[in-house]
Image (tube, helix red, strand yellow):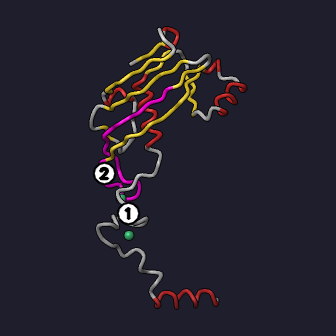
Amino acid sequence: MIVELTKLDSPQIEFDLEIEPEKLGLDIEYVEVLKPVKFEGVLKSKKYWSVIEGDIAAKLRVSCGRCLEPIPLDLDFSFENAYIGAEDFTEERETDLAVENLDVSIIDSDKMDLSEIAGEQISIELNKPIVCKEDCKGLCQKCGTNLNKKDCKCDEGPGDSRWSALSDIKIKK
Ligand SMILES: [Zn+2]
Ligand SMILES: [Zn+2]
């Protein structure tokens, strides 16, 4: 859904959308959107900028940040973000927006694509660390073994007493 800010009939519009995954403009490796995304909220148009207060619910499949196994991820979050045209974004207004404690996105035109805005917010959520479980052991840095599934031998070398004796000799040289 594209909103033309200059053509709003009212300073505030409410919306309740279901967005098809391909309209989100999300193109992140290891992230799959399984169902249309629910996005409801309100767009408030202020003098120099617009504010969206929204709720997003999405069912995704992502990869664990440590072991890369695919895991289901249900997102359900709220956000508040201001949108301001590049030419309106003066230093003074930057300060005003900071005072209101708003996250800010700069937009090129007065057309806002709510589908892409939903995609942008989802990608911000995905910046947070995501793991399959609290104590995921991840992958071995050397051989790539998934350490949740089995152990590898990579870490055993330095602990072996025969080899530490050898390194003592080297130090004496
Ligand atoms: Zn994991
Ligand atoms: Zn290993």
Question: Is 68 in the magenta?
Answer: yes
Question: Along the horizontal axis of the image, is 5 left or right of 100?
Answer: left
Three-letter residue code for mark 1: Cys
Q: Quadrant of residue 173?
A: bottom right
Q: Residue at position x 67%, y 33% from top?
A: 99
Q: Which stretch is magenta?
A: 52-72
Q: Does the residue labelled 1 lie within 8 Å of ligand 1?
A: yes
Residue 117 falls within the magenta-colored stretch: no
In this rendering, is residue 55 above or below 42? below
Q: Residue 71 carries which label?
A: 2
Q: In the depicted view, which residue is nearer to us: 138 or 91?
A: 91
Number of numbered markers: 2
Q: Which amino acid does label 2 sit on?
A: Ile
- What residue do we see at 43% from left, 64% from top? 141
Q: Does label 2 point to a residue whose CB lies under 8 Å from ligand 1? A: yes
Within-10-Å neighbours for mark 1: few <14, some 14–19, many 20+: some
Relative height, residue 132 to residue 111 (above, below): below
